[in-house]
C-alpha cells in the first residue's frame, strides 16, 4: 500500500524457533536452515543465543553456528545476549548485532533470567555500552508486554516504563513481545497508542507468538493502524520460551509475508524459499511445523 511502510522482518526461527524444541537439532541442520533463510531474502536473522547452556541447552552450540554459517552480504546476523559473559561470546564470533532481553512482568523476568526488571537493566548497562563501543547494533526485547503467564494482563504503562529505561541505556530498537501469544488487536492498539507517543514506529518491532491464532491479525493492525514496519517471525512457525508455560510458536514468517503481501505490502522475501528453509528442519523435529502455509501449496 502506497502510504504504508515496506516490511522489515527479523527472522527469529534459529533462536526462538528452536530454543523450545525437545530434540537436539544437529548443528549442520541449524546451519543449513540459516543459510536457506538468507537465500530467501531475509535481511536480519537471529542466529543463536549466548545464554547459559544450563538454561537453554538447545542454544549451547551457538558459537559453532556463527562460525559455520555462510554470511550473505547485507544480512544482519544477531544473537540474544543476557549479560556480559554473553556479550563476550557474541563478540568472539563477530555477531553483527545483539539483543538484550527483559520483561514488563517481574515474575516472568525472575523465571526467565533470574533477575528483577531493575536488576536486569543494571546488568544491561555495561553490555549495551560495550556492544556499541564495539560497533554492534543493540536491540532490546520487552517480553510479557501484553499478558504474563503468571501475572495475567500487563498494563501498557509498565511496558512504556521499561522501554524508557532501555532508551536511557542506549538501546536502539525495541521488540515488544507477546510472549504467550494471548494478545488481540485491541490490546495491540491500546499499547501502540501510547508507546508511539514516546518512540518512532521505525524503532519498534512487534514479536507475536501465535498461541491463540491472533498473531497475523495483530501484525496487520500494528502495520495498518500504526505504521509499524518491523516484525519478528519464525519460518515454519516454531517457537516458544521454555520459561513461559503455554507459549505457542512465533507467527510463521511465511504466513506473515503472505498476509502482508496479500494486503499490498512490500515484503521482499520469497515465500516458497522460506517454506523450503523450514522444511529442512522437519526430519529433526519429530512433529509437524505449525505454519498454515506450510500445509498448502502456494
Ligand atoms: P544465573 O544462574 O543467575 O547466572 O542465570 P550466573 O551469573 O549466576 O551464572 C550461573 C552459571 O551460568 C555460571 O556457570 C555461569 O558461567 C553460567 P557455572 O559457574 O555454574 O558453571 N553463565 C553463562 N554461561 C554461558 N553464557 C552466558 C552465561 N551467563 C551465565 N551468557 C542467566 C542468569 C541470565 C545467565 C540465565 O538465567 C539465562 O541464561 N537465561 C536465559 C533464558 C533464556 O534464554 N530464555 C529464552 C529466551 S527469552 C524469550 O524467548 C523471549 C523472547 O523471545 C521475546 C518474547 O517472546 O517475549 C526474547
Ligand atoms: Mg519469543
Image (spheres, rainbow, N blue to C red):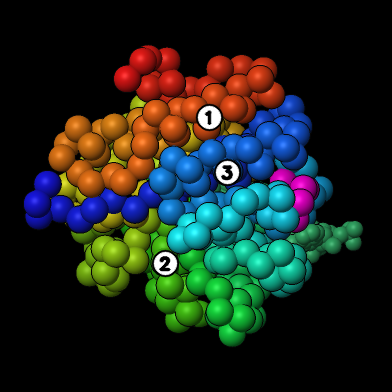
Q: Residue at label 1?
A: 278
Label 3 neighbour load within 10 Å: few <14, some 14-19, many 20+? some
Residue most extreme to the right: 54
At x 52%, y 51%, the residue is 45
Residue 114: x and y in percent read 70, 57
Which image quadrant for residue 287?
top right
Question: Which residue is at a point 38% across and 22% down the rendered structure image?
Answer: 293
- Nearer the observer, disc 2 or disc 3? 3
The numbered disc on residue 269 is none
Please say if 120 is above or below 12.
below
Q: At x 71% / y 64%, what residue is drawn? A: 93
The secondary structure that dominates the magenta segment is helix
Question: Residue 62 in magenta?
Answer: yes
Please report the bounds of the magenta region as a residue range. 59-64
* Mark 1 surroundings within 10 Å by alpha-carbon count, few (fewer than 14), some (14 through 19), many (20 or more): many
Distance between mark 1 and mark 3 Cα atoms: 11 Å
Check whether the beta carbons of the residues at disc 2 and disc 3 lie within 8 A of each other: no
| Farthest residue, direction left | 2
Residue at numbered disc 3:
35
Q: Is residue 284 left or right of residue 199?
A: right
Q: Is residue 294 magenta?
A: no
**85 lies above or below 66:** below
| 143 vs 56, nearest the viewer | 56
Pick whichever of labels 1 and 2 is earlier in the sequence: 2
* Ligand 1's quadrant: bottom right
Q: Is the residue indicated by label 1 positioned so its CB lies within 8 Å of ligand 2?
A: no
Q: Residues within 10 Å of mark 2 (few under 14, many from 20)?
A: many
Amino acid at each position: 500500500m502506497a502510504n504504508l511502510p515496506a516490511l522489515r522482518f527479523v527472522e527469529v526461527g534459529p533462536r526462538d524457533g528452536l530454543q523450545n524444541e525437545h530434540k537436539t537439532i544437529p548443528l549442520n541442520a541449524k546451519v543449513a536452515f540459516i543459510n536457506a533463510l538468507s537465500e530467501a531474502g531475509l535481511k536480519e536473522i537471529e542466529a543463536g543465543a549466548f545464554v547459559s547452556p544450563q538454561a537453554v541447552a538447545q542454544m549451547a552450540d551457538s558459537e559453532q553456528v556463527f562460525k559455520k554459517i555462510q554470511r550473505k552480504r547485507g544480512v544482519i546476523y544477531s544473537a540474544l545476549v543476557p549479560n556480559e559473559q554473553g556479550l563476550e561470546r557474541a563478540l568472539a564470533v563477530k555477531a553483527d548485532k545483539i539483543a538484550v532481553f527483559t520483561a514488563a512482568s517481574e515474575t516472568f523476568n525472575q523465571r526467565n533470567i533470574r533477575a528483577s526488571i531493575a536488576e536486569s537493566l543494571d546488568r544491561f548497562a555495561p553490555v549495551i555500552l560495550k556492544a556499541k563501543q564495539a560497533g554492534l547494533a543493540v536491540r532490546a526485547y520487552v517480553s510479557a508486554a501484553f499478558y504474563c503467564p503468571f501475572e495475567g494482563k500487563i498494563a501498557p504503562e509498565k511496558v512504556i516504563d521499561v522501554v524508557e529505561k532501555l532508551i536511557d541505556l542506549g538501546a536502539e530498537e525495541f521488540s515488544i513481545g507477546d510472549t504467550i501469544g494471548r494478545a488481540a488487536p485491541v490490546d495491540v492498539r491500546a499499547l501502540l497508542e501510547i508507546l508511539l507517543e514516546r518512540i518512532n514506529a521505525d524503532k519498534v518491532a512487534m514479536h507475536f507468538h501465535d498461541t491463540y491464532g491472533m498473531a497475523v491479525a495483530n501484525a496487520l493492525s500494528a502495520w495498518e493502524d500504526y505504521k509499524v514496519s518491523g516484525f519478528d517471525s519464525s519460518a515454519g512457525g516454531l517457537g516458544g520460551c521454555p520459561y513461559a508455560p503455554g507459549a505457542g510458536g512465533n507467527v510463521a514468517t511465511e504466513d506473515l509475508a503472505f498476509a502482508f503481501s496479500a494486503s499490498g505490502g512490500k515484503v521482499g522475501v520469497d515465500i516458497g524459499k522460506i517454506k523450503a528453509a523450514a522444511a529442512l528442519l522437519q526430519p529433526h523435529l519429530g512433529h509437524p511445523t505449525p505454519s498454515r502455509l506450510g500445509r498448502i501449496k502456494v
